[in-house]
Image (cartoon, helix red, strand yellow):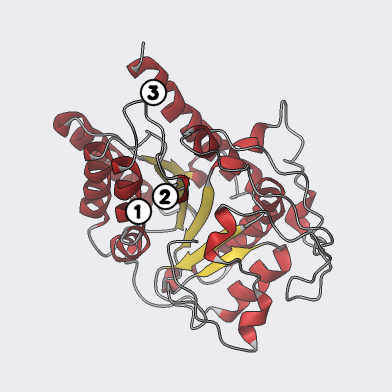
Amino acid sequence: MPFFSRKLYTPFSKIFSRRPDSSRFQPAANKDSKNGLGEVVGVDPPPYAAVVADSEASYLHPVVAPLDTVSSFPFSPAAVDIRYGTDNDYSFLSRFDTIFLVDDSGSMAGRSWKEAEEAIAAITPICTQYDCDGLDIYFLNHSSAFDESGGYPNIKSPRAVQQIFRSVKPRGMTPVGQRLRQILLPYLPRVQKMMANMNEYGRLRNPELEVRPINIIVITDGAFSDDAESVILKAAKTLEQCDAIPWQIGIQFFQIGTDIAAQKYLEQLDDNLGKAARNDNIRDIVDTVPWKGQAGRTLSGDGILKVVLGAVNKRHDRRRVEHT
């Protein structure tokens, strides 16, 4: 993500393709290249949209990039065809940076770990189709040695997802609050600076201060071992105080597995955050999904994106209501 500085090491860092910080505002190089996995990506896709001076439109309504030509890895979830929904259902991904925060506590070992890997691998080419930066992956306990943020930014292929997951061994606790704070800490000041630069018409005076909205998709199988609620509420208050757009930050919690206690915990978290938002007159930036609570469904890329789309639409609808 552009709000982290990069420090790469070899050889493992060559797996992941990265972009310079200025790529949000400059056209991509128009040449054949490889993505570090030996996959020819051909002509780089254009950026989301040219940034227009004094305009809010570029970060609210970027132009959808054409289908990227990153070669696909033979992966079973890739058979889930979610790229061609009605009216380009997933074109909303072009407006956001997509971040996965994955529970790598000890209880995730085994089937849940594989399920999370396959779901993210299925989503990766779809995200790359609409966002040439790909997606970012973070874990609760494991930190990447190849990036200052501790995450894996700009992942663009199922094969890269597979390699990352196979390099991480689930162990430890479930510190969701701590990891969310580390992700949001450098992001929120940039949002505040952007909003302070808006003119009286809600347009950016300096387009280089533009900050793309983010969706943080948290995949977990149990109750948290720290206070995520306070971190989320503080972020929501910050967004409210600087009058950021309602969809600047969205956080979706997906329960994986069949733990009833975990399901109740997430439901209670959702209730508590909703009540706090209403009582303090701040935005609700969280949606929770007890995934296996219905007919034994497994986590899937299609299901995740549909829920994220619903959450984005909900926040768009809320803004329309507020302005009528």
Q: Residue at x 42, y 54 (%)?
A: 259
Mark 1 or 2: the one toward you: 2
Can you tell which quarter of the image residue 71 is in? bottom right
| Cα–Cα span, label 2 and label 3 | 23 Å
Who is closer to the viewer here, 64 or 318?
64
In the rendered image, residue 240, in percent from the top left (x then y), is placed at 25, 37
Q: Is residue 233 above or below residue 274?
A: below
In the displayed structure, does residue 115 sit left or right of residue 275? right
Who is closer to the viewer here, 225 or 130?
130
In the rendered image, residue 125, in percent from the top left (x then y), is placed at 72, 54
Q: Which mark is residue 173?
A: none
- For the residue labelled by badge 3, is the local secondary structure a helix, a strand or a loop? helix
- For the residue labelled by badge 2, is the local secondary structure a helix, a strand or a loop? helix
Can you tell which quarter of the image residue 58 is in? top right
Q: Which mark is residue 209?
A: 2
Q: Residue at x 24, y 45 (%)?
A: 238
Who is closer to the viewer here, 108 or 53?
53
